[in-house]
Image (spheres, rainbow, N blue to C red):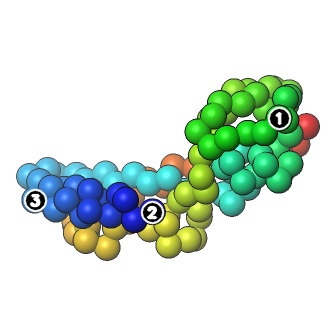
Amino acid sequence: RQWYQPRVAITAGVINNLGSSFDIIYKTADWHPSDHISFHSNVCSGHHPLENPADTKMFETVKVKGPPSLNQTLWPDHCVQGSKGAEFHPDLKVFPGEVKILKKKKVPTATLR
């Protein structure tokens, strides 16, 4: 997690400087449930069954059993709802009237078995 901290702080500064130039500010963030299908840890634990459950690797694309079956890239757990990692960077200014959009996608487990 440490590798991106300096980049995020620089980006927050740019957003803060530009923010007053716009009438509406939209902030978006991932907001995943802890059992999200894209998390490598969930696939490795068998939480989401794979068509070919060989050794899976992070950032690999696998086929998850259906219906409907789907191709899914595996990511480390990130932006889990309610966790510190899902928060906006503390250096981001809060702008009057800003709109925050939390992006979440949950594919019901029952549809994957």
> For the point 45% across and 63% down, which residue is it?
1
Closer mark to the observer between disc 1 and disc 3: 1
At label 3, counting other C-alpha atoms closer than 10 Å, the crowd grade (few under 14, some 14-19, many 20 or more) is few
The residue indicated by pointer 2 is 1
On the image, the x and y values in percent for residue 24 come to 22, 52
Q: Residue furthest front?
A: 55
* Position of 88 relative to 31 (above/below): below
* First in sequence: mark 1 vs mark 2: 2
CA gap between label 1 and label 2 equals 27 Å
Say what amino acid the circle numbered 2 marks.
Answer: Arg
Secondary structure category for the residue under label 3: helix
The residue indicated by pointer 3 is 17
Say what amino acid the circle numbered 3 marks.
Answer: Asn
Secondary structure category for the residue under label 2: loop
Q: Residue 54: which disc?
A: 1
* Figure quadrant of residue 81: bottom right
* First in sequence: mark 2 vs mark 3: 2
CA gap between label 2 and label 3 equals 25 Å
* Position of 35 relative to 38 (above/below): below
Closer mark to the observer between disc 1 and disc 2: 1
